[in-house]
Amino acid sequence: MQNNAPVDIFQGCRAEQSAGAGNSCRVTTVKGNKMKTYMLTGIILIVLGVIAFAYQGITYTTREKVVDIGPIEISADSEKTFPLPPIVGGIALVGGIVLLVMGNKKS
């Protein structure tokens, strides 16, 4: 069975105030925090989506040993690219826009 009785969210505040703790109670809503989280995540995804479209891949350099004979070492720098398909940028962009709209939606 479900208990549909109303919940008194100020009960703890009243107990603190009667004990002389002053007026230090704050009530935060989960809905407000979720909206901020959606908006922040949406903005981050939009920025990452734009960056993914602009760069189309991540390039990095590795150093590899070519010759290693006693005290003599010869190494070569090798440049490698990790490609990012445009679909990744598109998904991040669309996901960011959806989260931004969900965060702005007032219901």
Image (cartoon, grey):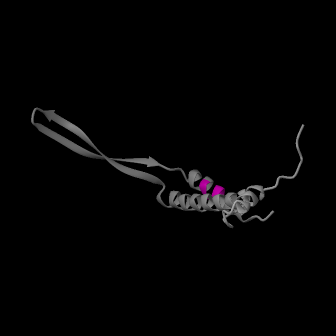
Secondary structure mostly seen in magenta is helix
Q: Is residue 106 left or right of residue 65?
A: right
For residue 41, which quarter of the picture?
bottom right
50 or 17: which is nearer to us? 17
Residue 59: x and y in percent read 39, 51
74 or 31: which is nearer to us? 31
Q: Is residue 63 above or below residue 86?
A: above
Look at 10% across and 32% down and name the residue there. Answer: 70
63 or 31: which is nearer to us? 31
Residue 84: x and y in percent read 50, 50
Residue 63: x and y in percent read 27, 44
Look at 47% across and 58% down and name the residue there. Answer: 55
Inspect the magenta stretch and tell me whether residue 12 lies in it: no
Which contiguous range is marked in magenta?
92-96
In this view, the residue farthest toward the top is 70
Residue 27 seen from this side: no
